[in-house]
Structures are given as C-alpha cells and as structure tokens.
C-alpha cells in the first residue's frame, strides 16, 4: 500500500514559486510550461500509469513553501503518474515529469492563474509557480505490484517471527516480576485483578473503559485516568469492530461489568512494526491496566 499518494499536478496547481532560476536554461512544453532538466541520467523516462518515487520542493520567491523531505522525514513521495483533468494545461507539469528517469532532477515553472493570484496576494506580478523535483525511481505497474507483493511477503514473515519473540519477552517479564497470568488463544496475557458481575462483554456491544497504557520499560504513554494526558472521560467504542487495537478487542471481551484487569498485548495485536513514534516504538509489547465500567 502506498504510504502517501500525492498528485503532482494538483500540488502544482496550488503552489506559487519564484520567477527566476538558471536564466537562459529553460525550455517550454507545447502548453507553455517552462522547465530546466538540471540532471539527466540514463534510463527509461516515466510514462502515464507508471509508479514514481520523488522528492519535491516548492517556493515563492526566496520563501520555501514546502519540502517533501521534511514532510516525509526524508522518505520519498510515491504515486501513480496520472494527469489531473482539473489542472489547466499551462499549469500541468506532467509532460515534464514524463521526460525524467530515475536519478534525474528538474526545475519546473509556470505562470499563476487568477485563482492562484487571489490565493497568494503577496506574490509579485512577475512571480511564477516553481517546483524542484528529484526523481528517485520509476517503475512500471507490473514492477510496482511485484515489489508490493515482495514487501508484503517480507512483512508477513517478519510478523510471524515476531509472534515468538513477543511471547518469549512477555513470559520473561512475567517471570521476572513474579506475575501469574493467563493466555488467550491469540496470545494476549491477562490478569483479572478485580472480578466484575454478570456476563462478559461481547462483540457489537458499546463499552466504556478506563485505562492506562505503558511500554514494558514502565513508560506511560496514555491514560484517561491521569489528568496530564488531558482526557479523563471514559473511552467508548464498539467491541469487535476494530475501532481499537486487536489486543483490546480481545482483552475487553474477557471482562464483565466492573472488572479490572492488566493486559499484556503482543506487538502484532497492537501497533506492530509501524509503532506510534515517539511514544510507542516499532514492535512494542504494550501493558494496559483497564476497567470495564459498563457496556450495552
């Protein structure tokens, strides 16, 4: 799955750039888009329908409007190259993009239309939209899909391996701290610290829960009991609808009304390899103290 899909044409249509860059080095497409290919490497140029990875910068005069490297923490943007029919031809950089292969870089600029000038009233009459693009890779649809399948297979293999790693870490933690816990079918370890009354909550029920979550090193990352996290109202969600992490759907279903418990949730049933940085690193086992207040 693409981490982010960003239409170059749509982005270009709203960004305003400087008028001058490498004077004399620019050419024009048939629709009047100016371009200067700063670096030209050997390779197949991008075609409509190809999947490209790229970095992009937009400017207004001396002011930086955006830098995709900063937006993406250094990662390249990814997209399927398509024309945006809503973009005026004189403001569409797609023809220039189709001249670029992996490793190429170019500066693209064009006149602002009336909408852009109304939006960016500070732009000088001579200012133009300017984009600086660095092409990282160009892949055909078949190459892209093959790469995605390989990534998926690698992720699944790593996730499968992580199941055993997490289980061992949880057992070591429990043993070290003298904790006796039960284990659910999916691998959630749990301790019911205070029994409740009645039947357990079931899928489809709306539950109300108090909780505190921490990592295995004891760092609390969220709570609706501690005022420092600025949300002390009970958490409500529909059980079994994946509105929460999988470990919660299963863990809360082990409880009845009024019950309190501690859940030890493997990373695969929490936030997995992606984590939730900076509070929750990749492949983190999470520990939750929970109380099921009510369900209906």
Image (cartoon, rainbow, N blue to C red):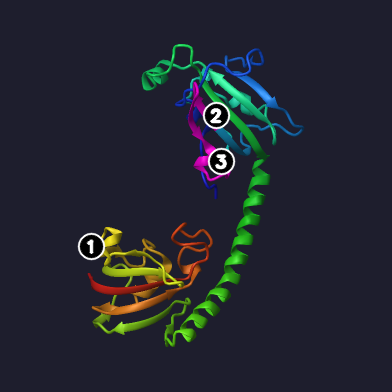
Sequence-wise first label, 3 or 2: 3
- Within 10 Å of disc 1 (Cα), the crowding (few <14, some 14-19, many 20+) is few
- Asked whether 281 or 32 is in front, the reply is 281
The Cα–Cα distance between marks 1 and 2, rounded to whole angstroms, is 47 Å
Question: Which residue is identified by label 1?
Answer: 233
Q: Residue at x 48, y 16 (%)?
A: 127
Circle 2: element type: loop
Q: Which-is-in-front pick, marks 1 and 2?
A: 1
Sequence-wise first label, 1 or 3: 3
Sequence-wise first label, 1 or 2: 2
Question: Which residue is identified by label 2?
Answer: 83
Which of the labelled discs sits on residue 77, or is there none? 3
Q: Position of residue 74 (x, y in %)?
A: 57, 44
Image position of 38 (left or right of 254):
right
Q: What stretch is highlighted in magenta?
A: 57-77
Q: Residue at x 44, y 11 (%)?
A: 125
- Asked whether 21 or 193 is in front, the reply is 21
């Amino acid at each position: 799955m693409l981490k982010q899909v960003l239409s170059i044409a749509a982005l270009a249509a709203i960004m305003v750039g400087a008028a001058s860059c490498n004077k004399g080095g620019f050419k024009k497409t048939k629709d009047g888009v100016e371009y200067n290919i700063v670096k030209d490497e050997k390779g197949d140029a991008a075609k409509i329908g190809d999947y490209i990875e790229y970095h992009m910068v937009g400017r207004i005069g001396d002011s930086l409007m955006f830098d995709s490297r900063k937006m993406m923490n250094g990662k390249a943007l990814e997209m399927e190259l398509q024309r945006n029919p809503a973009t005026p031809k004189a403001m569409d950089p797609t023809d220039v993009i189709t001249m670029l292969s992996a490793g190429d870089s170019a500066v693209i600029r064009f006149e602002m239309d009336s909408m852009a000038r109304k939006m960016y009233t500070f732009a000088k009459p001579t200012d133009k939209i300017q984009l600086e693009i660095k092409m990282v890779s160009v892949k055909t649809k078949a190459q892209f899909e093959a790469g995605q399948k390989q990534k998926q297979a690698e992720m699944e293999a790593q996730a499968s391996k992580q199941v055993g790693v997490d289980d061992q870490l949880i057992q070591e933690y429990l043993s070290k701290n003298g904790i006796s816990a039960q284990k659910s079918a999916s691998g959630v370890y749990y301790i019911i610290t205070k029994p409740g009354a009645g039947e357990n909550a079931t899928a489809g029920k709306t539950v109300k829960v108090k909780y505190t979550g921490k990592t295995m090193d004891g760092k609390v990352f969220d709570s609706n009991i501690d005022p420092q996290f600025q949300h002390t109202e009970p958490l409500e969600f529909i059980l079994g609808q994946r509105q929460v992490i999988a470990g919660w759907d299963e863990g809360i279903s082990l409880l009845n009304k009024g019950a309190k418990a501690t859940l030890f949730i493997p990373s695969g049933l929490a936030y997995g390899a992606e984590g939730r940085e900076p509070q929750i690193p990749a492949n983190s086992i999470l520990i939750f103290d929970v109380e099921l207040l009510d369900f209906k």
